Image (cartoon, rainbow, N blue to C red):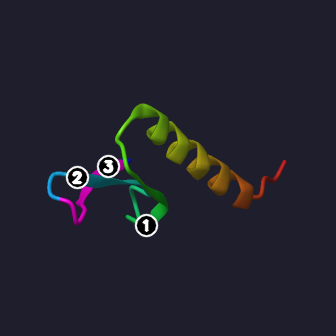
Amino acid sequence: MDVTPLPSRVKGEFYYLYMVEDLFSRFGVNWEVFEHENSENTCHVIEQSMWRYWRGVTRFI
């Protein structure tokens, strides 16, 4: 999980890029940009990443 501040056109204001990436391939699994940095946004991006990943995985039992 990485949170990167992105500068806006207004001096002193930032957007925040929340990105979840695979540790081995460095592939961006999910990302989203928000106006504020807080824990709700972090939970939202992580939850979306988990749903996106588990939906594509087939399970053999």
Question: Which sits earlier in the primary sequence, circle 3 or circle 2?
Answer: 3
- In 3D space, how far apart are the residues under numbered discs 3 and 2 (Cα atoms)? 15 Å
Image disc number at residue 13: 2
In the image, is 52 to the left or to the right of 20?
Answer: right
- Identify the residue at horizontal 25%, vertical 53% (top origin): 14
Closer to the camera, 55 or 48?
48
Disc 2 is placed on an element classified as loop
Residue beneath the point at 44% across and 58% down: 22
Q: Position of residue 36 (x, y in %)?
A: 36, 43
Please identify, in this view, whether the residue under mark 1 or under mark 2 is nearer the observer. 2
Q: Which residue is drawn at 46% across and 59% down?
A: 31
Q: Mark 1 points at which residue?
A: 27
* Residue for point 15% across, 52% down: 12
Q: Which amino acid does label 1 sit on?
A: Phe
Callout 3, which amino acid? Val
Tell me how far mark 1 sits from mark 3, CA to CA: 15 Å
Q: In this view, does 30 lie to the left or right of 14?
A: right
Would you place residue 27 above or below residue 48 in this image?
Answer: below
| Quarter of image, res 52 | bottom right
Q: Where is residue 34 shown, x and y percent of the image?
A: 41, 51
Say which of marks 3 and 2 sits in front.
Answer: 2
Residue 15 spot, x, y in % from top left: 32, 55
Secondary structure state at the residue bearing disc 3: strand
Q: Is mark 1 on a helix, strand or loop?
A: loop
Residue receiving disc 3: 3
Q: Residue 47 carries which label?
A: none
The local crowd at label 1, few if under 14, some if 14 to 19, many if 20 or more residues have their Cα within 10 Å, is few
Crowding around mark 2 (Cα neighbors within 10 Å: few <14, some 14 to 19, many 20+) is: few
Magenta span: predominant SS is: strand
Give the mark, 1 or 2, whose residue is nearer the N terminus.
2
| Local crowd size for mark 3, using a 10 Å CA cut-off: few (<14), some (14–19), many (≥20) | some
Magenta region: 2-10
